Image: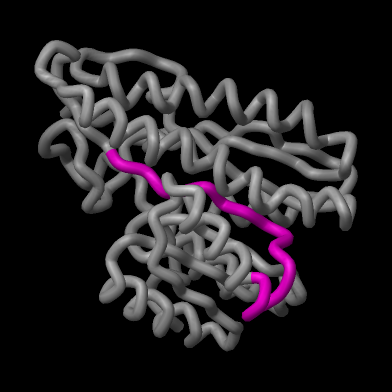
Amino acid sequence: MNPIGEANGEKSFGKPLAGKVVLVTGGNRGIGKAIAWKLASLGADVGICGRDEESLLRAASEIESAGVRVHAQKANVSRNHDVAALVQATEKRIGPITVLVNNAGIGLFGPVQVHSEEDWDRVLDTNLKSVFLVTRAVVPGMIARKSGDIINISSLAGKYTFAGGAIYCAAKWGLQGLTGCMAEDLRGFGIRVSAICPGSVATEFAGRGPKDASKLLTAEDVAYAVGMVVMQGPQSFISEVQLRPVGKPGTT
């Protein structure tokens, strides 16, 4: 088995997500790649996107080893044209999207006064606007089928502030609000919208400086939580999951 699928000591018995079609934005690396692998290992066909074609092809090859169909497409999900093309191509290749994981995100950190307007636009467009655009493109099909899961990868930075986090926190606080409103707008159509809020995760994501990796979450921890949300019973609705490492970063 691909090592990504061995997180949390779990082995998959059967394919409980067989017949599901998942789209994971930013699924070419880090948390997104772990989520894509996790849901593929449970039987779902998977679409992934990212801006780097080389890493997309590597990720697609790994995910295909789970024995599912995979569609990988280069896309900038902060651009409406790219989003429309992504959703159309994914559904043509592997079928109607039943699970959307809005994972694409970047981080820029530092005092608010050192950042430029371009920094603000880049973070807000990637971390917040993209969720609006991709969700808007996928939801009509879910409404027609009266079912679907939308999972937004947020952060504890969407609930707590910290020095140097102004732009990142603004995007994630906005994502928390957007997620809650989407949930209320769509639950009447049988669509569940959830937020996963991890603390510090050991990935190549640009964080706030070096940390002890033994006191960080892993990408697979986040993927495990996504799998749990997708596999909940049809009558239940997990609106938010907060994830923290057992060891508190910055302590000895």
Q: Which of 65/23 is in front?
A: 23
Left or right of 130, for residue 161:
left
User: Is residue 225 visible to the viewer in this orientation of the structure?
Assistant: no
**Quick one: which residue is furthest to the front in this view?**
81
Quadrant assignment for the C terminus = top left
Q: Which residue is pictured at 73% across the width and 67% down the height? A: 96
Inspect the magenta stretch and tell me whether residue 93 lies in it. yes
Q: Which residue is pictured at 60% across the width and 62% down the height? A: 87
Q: Relative to 231, is 248 above or below?
A: above
Left or right of 241, for residue 8:
left
Q: Position of residue 210 (x, y in %)?
A: 11, 38
Q: Position of residue 94 (x, y in %)?
A: 66, 78
Q: Position of residue 201 (x, y in %)?
A: 32, 43
Q: Relative to 93, is 209 above or below?
A: above
Q: Which residue is pictured at 49% across the width and 22% down the height? A: 174
Range of residues picked out in magenta: 91-106
User: Is residue 55 visible to the viewer in this orientation of the structure?
Assistant: yes
Q: Position of residue 209 (x, y in %)?
A: 12, 34
Inspect the magenta stretch and tell me whether residue 35 lies in it. no
